[in-house]
């Protein structure tokens, strides 16, 4: 009887998880905060990368992971951001406030890229 209870609990937990929609397909891509030097890139596997270039040129960045149904858990700097989507914008609400990002085709600034991804002669 205990085996059946464990099996039933495992099944019900999977059903509950399967019914929770994930925002991942909607947030995959490159996002930018206003026209500032702040980007977030989220790939299809849920890996996230955020880069901010401060006024003095200081680069702040962190890698993170998308957590279903709708948040990003950053490894450093920013904690957990809750994602809300509306009208093509992605809002992130976390420990430091709420910020709205828009999809962009403007590439990350080269100083945001790891050295192996920068083009030759890129000034950092």
Image (cartoon, rainbow, N blue to C red):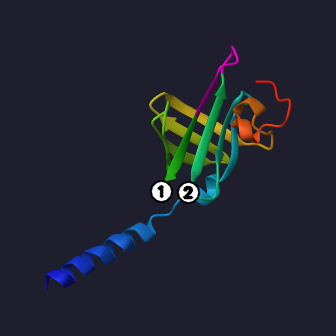
Spot occupied by residue 17 in the image (x, y as percentages of width and height):
40, 67
Image mark for residue 35: none
Left or right side of 115 for 75: left
Q: Residue at x 61, y 37 (%)?
A: 50
Q: Which residues are magenta?
A: 54-61
The answer for how far apart the CA atoms under marks 1 and 2 are is 7 Å
Quadrant in the picture for the N terminus: bottom left
Give the position of the C terminus as an image quadrant.
top right
Q: Residue at x 65, y 28 (%)?
A: 52
Where does residue 101 sit, x and y in percent of width and height?
65, 38
Mark 2 crowd level (few <14, some 14–19, many ≥20, 10 Å Cα): some
**Any mark on residue 23, and which?**
2
Magenta stretch: helix, strand or loop mostly = loop
Instruction: Check the image and report above or below for 124 versus 7.
Output: above
Residue 43: % across, % down? 64, 53
Q: Which residue is mark 1?
A: 68
SS state under label 1: loop
> Does the residue at mark 1 contact the one at mark 2 (Cβ under 8 Å)?
yes
Q: Residue at x 71, y 28 (%)?
A: 37
**Residue at point 19%, 79% (across, down):** 5
* 57 falls in the magenta region: yes
Image position of 88 (left or right of 16): right
């Amino acid at each position: 009887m205990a085996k059946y209870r464990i099996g039933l609990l495992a099944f019900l937990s999977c059903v509950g998880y399967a019914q929770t929609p994930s925002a991942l397909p909607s947030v995959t891509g490159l996002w930018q905060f206003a026209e500032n030097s702040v980007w977030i890139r989220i790939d299809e596997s849920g890996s996230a990368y955020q880069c901010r270039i401060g006024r003095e040129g200081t680069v702040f960045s962190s890698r993170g992971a998308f957590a279903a149904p709708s948040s990003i858990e950053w490894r450093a700097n920013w904690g957990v951001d809750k994602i809300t989507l509306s009208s093509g914008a992605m809002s992130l609400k976390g420990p430091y406030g709420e910020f709205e990002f828009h999809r962009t085709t403007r590439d990350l600034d080269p100083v945001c890229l790891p050295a192996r991804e920068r083009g030759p002669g890129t000034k950092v």
